[in-house]
Image (spheres, rainbow, N blue to C red):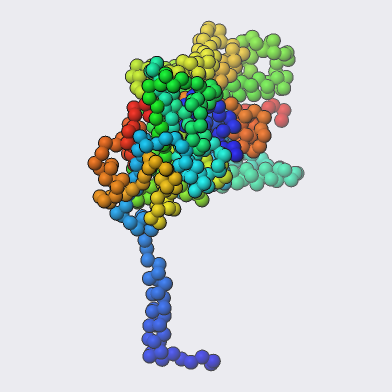
Amino acid sequence: MPVHGEIWTVKELFVLPNEYIYWAIQIVMYPFMTGLVAGAFVLSSLYHVFGVKALKDIARFALVFSMSLLPVAMMPLQLHLMQPLRGIEVMMTPHFTSAIAAFGIVFMTYASIVASELWFVYREHFVTTARALSAKSDRSALDGMRLMLFRALTLGAYDVSEAALAKDHKAVTILAGIGIPVACFLHGYAGFIFGSVKANALWMTPLMPVIFIMSAIVSGIALCILVYITISVYRHRTAGGVSGGSRECSTAKEVLCVPGTMAAMDATRYLRIFMIFAITLELLDIIFRGYTAVKSWDILRQVIYGKDFYNIFIFQYGVGNLLPFILLMLPGLTVRRTVVAAVLVLFGVFMMRWNVVIGGQSFSLTFSGFMHYHMPVVPSDLETFREGLGGVMLVAVTPFVIFHFLNKVMPVFPAREGR
Amino acid sequence: MGFDVMDRREFIRSTAIFIAGASVPAAALEVMSAKELFAARPDIHWVFLVDTTKCVGCGFCVKACKLENGIPYDANVTRTWVERYVLTKDGKVRADTPKGARDGFITKQIDENAEGMKDIKDEDIDKAFFVPKLCNQCDNPPCVQVCPVGATYKTADGVVLVDRTWCIGCGYCIMGCPYGVRFFHPVEHVADKCTFCYHRITKGRKTACVEACPFGARDIGNIKDPNDPVAKVIMTQRVGVLKDEYGTKPQAFYIGLSKEVR
């Protein structure tokens, strides 16, 4: 009779009978997705709160994208639960000594802040759209439904005078301001879930929440840059802005003419800053562990410098941190280089989550055995789908699907001429 | 009119009957705290005593536990298990617990999982011994602390239990336990662990593993009873606990614990 975790765990040397990799790929995806949510929000707040003008174009996109990512932050947890139908009990009957119990409160607070901020940002758009639709004499059935939707979205507030819009703007600034600490809390608490597990020698460090927040911001900014550039260039091309193929696009000058890419390039500055913070903290953690060398260091050293060497030093630090950092620092930054760097940064942050979650379970509580994780690729039943590549793809694709629909109601990009 | 007008005497009589009748169910609904309900015996605090010097690694305790508590016999999880430690002259410590020692230790080879079976010559061995393990029913249980819905809880008489109807199966308690005693039940799909055979001890019986042990290596007792033989040993002899550095205050005590035991 298979036990949960047995199918993807290989034990080596002395491992206790009940030990398996219980927290598998979905728990890697959970902090990764939450991190993207928090990071995207922080990027949008850089404009809304700190008035970084260069980020104006990307800020609106980052906010809507953060909203699209938000429901997906819960998805990995839901897919991971052994009793998914009871998942709601975390919100309904929280047990407050548990770090996870805070999830409902933090998550809902954050969701309301993002939703309210979006409403204030897009209220003018809702009103003008609703008015335009109601003025239309030959409304189709679809238009009728859209009218109902937009009327509902205005919440009855049709005042779009100068003074009212100024108030909206002020509300956005305040909400974005409150949102930053809440976003950090949302993700810092994900770090706390791991950092507070005293039974796990690799996880237990008070630095964990801070490391998580920094890498979250890094990944959120990187994803926004990547998606924003991709969509901007795609829109520009389909609109006939750039005639040629990818060769012409590789030169900096031409693509920089594409509206939007400039803002994305400006965001790389903040990406670099937060990368420095993230890497510094992560290295501090490893150095501190090595220097203090408590009882667990023997096995941690074997994991960090041996079993997981490639995952940590080559993939995470090398390919995921150092290489993109160099790419971003070299003078004459091109759009293509930015895109490559953003992809690598995302990969690096994903590897960091992997190395924390899987790496933390790759050694036994006996400190004299190891466990190796083999992610299920081809599902053989529901469990190997949920906790395998299938589940991961589901989680990864969903935010883009949500964004597609959200973008129809809250357009991120200016409407094309001639429409 | 169809109905009689009630006079004062009739009214008082009916009222008295109504109040008397209503007060019976009200008395039945006496409010009790959960603690009172679950442990009407505040004079009990269950503890476990393992005498490692008596254990021969026969695995009868593991078998008995699996059968008693409905843990699928062939599933590679168990509420209790026995570890074998072999210390060789070259200073190495080797340990194993094949299938949790459900079938005992039937070969001298050490089961190193993916590394295969390791031969050790008798003349190379300095010392070797067995250590039975089970839930420590910690007084400061991290599993109870981290459960997001309160499905796992500590009874007033000291045993940590899991509510199978409430557990969401997140696995946080499994991660939080420094002793690796928790797992997902392969049939119930919720967290599972040793309960000190709560269904037995609350009826005055010993746990299944204690009854199955032919050598008296395991025993359960009440630390609050000065005449309890287990309590007497813990109070008067030198006993150790596992991993006390985690601050969990484990309630399973060990005689003859060696420093190699993890």
The quadrant in which the N terminus of chain A is found is: top right
Residue B35: % across, % down = 36, 55
Residue depicted at x 64% and y 34%: A385
Residue at the farthest left position:
B236
Task: Pick the residue in front: A258 or B148.
Answer: B148
Residue A268: % across, % down = 52, 17
Q: How many marks?
A: 0
The answer to whether residue B208 is left or right of residue A229 is: left
Q: Is residue B4 visible?
A: yes
Above or below B106: residue B201: below
Task: Pick the residue in front: A348 or A291.
Answer: A291
Task: Pick the residue in front: B261 or A8.
Answer: B261
Residue depicted at x 57% and y 39%: B74
Residue depicted at x 42% and y 35%: B56
Residue A317: % across, % down = 49, 15
The quadrant in which the C terminus of chain A is found is: top right
The answer to whether residue A36 is left or right of residue A285 is: right
Residue depicted at x 52% and y 34%: B99
Task: Pick the residue in front: B245 or A332.
Answer: B245
Above or below B186: residue A213: above
The answer to whether residue B80 is left or right of residue A61 is: left
Q: Is residue A160 visible?
A: no
Residue at the farthest front position:
B123
